Image (cartoon, coloured by chain):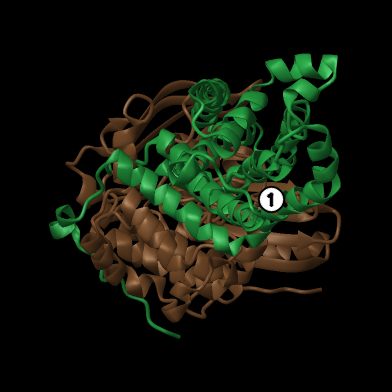
Chain colours: A green, B brown
Amino acid sequence: MTSLSITTTGPHDRAAIHARPAPALRDVISIAGRALRAVPREPEAIIPPVFIALFFFVVNIGTLQHLTQSHIKGFDFKAFMLPTAILLGVTGVSRAGSLVTDIQDGYLDRLLLTPVRRLAILVGHMAADVAVACALMVPIIGLALGLGVRPQAGPVGIALFLLMGCLWSLAFAGFGYAIALKTGNPAAVNSSFLLFFPFLFMTSSYVPRSQLSGWLNVIATWNPVTYVLEGLRSLVTFGWQWAALGKAALAIAAVGVLSMSLCLAALRGRTRRG
Amino acid sequence: MSLLQAERYEGQQTAGATAPAAIKVERLVRRFGDVTAVDEVDLEIRRGEIYGFLGPNGAGKSTTVRVLCTLLSPTAGRAVVAGYDVATRPEQVRLRIGVALQEAALDPKQTGIELLRLQGRLYGLSRAEIRRRLTDLGQLIDIGDALGRPIGTYSGGMKRRLDLAAALIHNPEVLFLDEPTSGLDPVSRARMWDEVRRLNTELGMTIFLTTQYLEEADELAGRVGIIDGGRLVAEGSPAQLKRSVGSDLIVAQVDGRAEAARRAVEPLAGVRGVEVRGEEMIVTTFDGAATIGAVAVALASVTPVRHLTLRTPSLDDVFLEYTGNHFTGGQLADDHLRQAGPDGSARQQRDLVGVRS
C-alpha cells in the first residue's frame, strides 16, 4: 500500500498561506468558470433548445410563409420569425437545474462554507447563462442569414440583437433560479419553462399584432414579450426604431426586476435557513 | 487508557492549555419547527485538540456541526469558532475553518483538480499559492493521474481523500470532519485515521470529529462528547468515560433464568453490580480476572452459559450508562474493525474466557 504522509505547511509557516476574501469579480468569474466548463459535459442541456428553435423556425417558415406574405403586402415572414426563434431558443436556458443538483448533492453547501459572496454564486451562474445564450443564438442567426434574412440595422444592429436576446434570457432565467433556490426541486425548475409558453404564444409570435383577434390583441398588448419581439424585429425588418427598442428595453427591465427580486429573496431564504 | 491514548490526550491538553478555546458553545439550541435538534449544548474545545462528537443517527451531531460551520443559524445560545461568533461574524469563521461534510459534496462532472483549484480561488489564494498547496496536499490526495478525471469515476475512498484535501486547501485553523469514514472499508478508514492524527500532531490543527463509530472516537479523540436526543449527556476523555462505568465487565450470555443467575452472582465477592438485559448479563467488577472464575461457577450452577467474556468497558458501555440504550450506529463496522483492526490486530475487546455449554 502506498504510504501516506502529509507535507503540508506546519504551524510555524502556516501564516504564509491563509484564506482571505477574494475580490467580488473573482468570485463571479470562478463560479461562472465552473458553470461554463460543465456546459460541454452536459450537451443534453444545450442541444434541445437549439434544435427546438431551429426546427420551429424552419417548419413555421415552410408552413406560413406563403400564407402570410400573400396576405400582407411587403411582409418578410423569415425576418419576422427570427426573433420568435431566438426567444424560443434562449428563454429558459439556464443553469438553474444544475443549481438544484448542487443543492441536492450538497455542493451548494460546499460553496456556502467558503468565503464566496452569496450573490456571486447567483451572478456567476447567470453570467455563464448569458455566454451560453449568446452562443445559442449564433446558429439561429446564421441559419436566418443563410435563408436570405438581411437585418436592416446592419452589423451593429445584429450586435444589439444579440445583446437584447442575452438580456432577455437573463431576465427570464431569474424565475428558474428563484424556483430552484426556493424549492430545490428539479421538476419544479423544469416546469418553469411552462410559464413562458402562454407569454410566447399569446403575443405577436406568428403574425403582427394588427392581425391578432380582439381578445388576443388585448392580451398581447399587456404581454411584455410582445415588446421584446417588436424591438428585435425592428432591428431586423426596419432598422433603428428607437421607440420600439425603448419599449423592448423597458419590457426586459420589468421582467428582470421581477425575476431578480424573487431570485434574491429565494437566495436570502436559502442561505438563512441552510 | 492505553499509553498511546494517555500521551495523545496529554499532548493535546498541553497544546491548548493556555490558548483560548478554538470552539466555545454556550447553551446552543437549534430547532426545526417543533423539533429541537440541538438542545442547550455547551462545549469548550481547546486549540490543538481532537474532539470526538459521538451519537447515533438523528442525535444532533450534524446539526451542531452545521451551526458551528455557519450553514445554519442557531435558534438560541452562542457559538464562537476560531475566535468569532458564528451568528454575527460568519465570514470570519469561514476563513478559518475547513469542513468535510458527511456526504462528500462533490460535483461528479468536475475533475479533482478543477475542484481543488476552485476551492483555492474561493478562499482568495493566488495561482502560485494554489499550486503550492496542491503540491503540499499531493500525498494526502494520493490519487495520481485520476486527479484529472471526472470525480464521478472515483471510488468512495478517493472521494473522501479529495474532500479532505479540499477542506485543507486554505490551511484552516479548525477542521470539522462530519463522519469522515462513514461508508469506507476498514483499510480506507485506517488511512483516514492516520491523516487525522497527523493533521493534529504535525500541524496542531484543532479537529472536531463527529462519528457514529465508537472505535473511531476511542482511537482519535482526546475528549469525547456523547450527544443523544440533542443533549450532551456525557463528556470526557475516553478513559475517563470508561472509568465512570466501572473497571472491568464480565458479560454472560445465558439460556434463560437470567434473574436466577443475577441472584447467584450478586452476593459474590468483588462484584460491584449486575445488570440483566434479556439473556445478557453484565457484571461490573474492579478486578475481572479475580472475579470471573467465581462468576462462571455461580452461573453454571443455575443456568447454561453460552458465552462468557471479560472485557474492559467500551464507549458502548458508556453510551448505555448515560442514555439507557446500546449504541447501534456504526456498530457492525465497529465489530468488523475490532476483528481486524487497522493494524491487523484485535484491540479493544479481550475475550479472555469463552465458555460454551
Of all residues, the one furthest to the front in this rendering is A73
> Is the residue marked by circle 1 packed among few (<14), some (14-19), or many (20+) residues within 10 Å?
many
Under mark 1, the amino acid is Pro
For residue A88, say whether it is visible. Answer: yes
Provide residue B247's location: percent of width, then percent of height. 49, 54
Provide residue B68's location: percent of width, then percent of height. 42, 36
Judged left or right of residue A109, residue B329 is: right
Provide residue B263's location: percent of width, then percent of height. 75, 48
For residue B349, say whether it is visible. Answer: no
Picture quadrant of residue B340: bottom right
- Dot 1: chain letter: A
Number of marks present in the image shown? 1
Picture quadrant of residue A124: top left
| Residue B238 sits above or below residue A191 on the image | below
Q: Which residue is drawn at 49% across and 31% down?
A: A240
Provide residue A41's location: percent of width, then percent of height. 58, 64
Residue in front for this viewpoint, B274 or B138: B138
Residue in front for this viewpoint, B305 or B341: B341
Residue in front for this viewpoint, A32 or B160: A32
| Residue B7 sits above or below residue B240 on the image | below
Judged left or right of residue B196, residue B215 is: right
Q: Which residue is drawn at 51% across and 70% down?
A: B158
Q: Residue at x 60, y 74 (%)?
A: B339
| Residue B145 sits above or below residue A66 on the image | below
Dot 1 lies on which element? Answer: helix
Give the position of the N terminus of chain A as an image quadrant.
Answer: bottom left
> Can you identify the residue that label 1 sits on?
A49
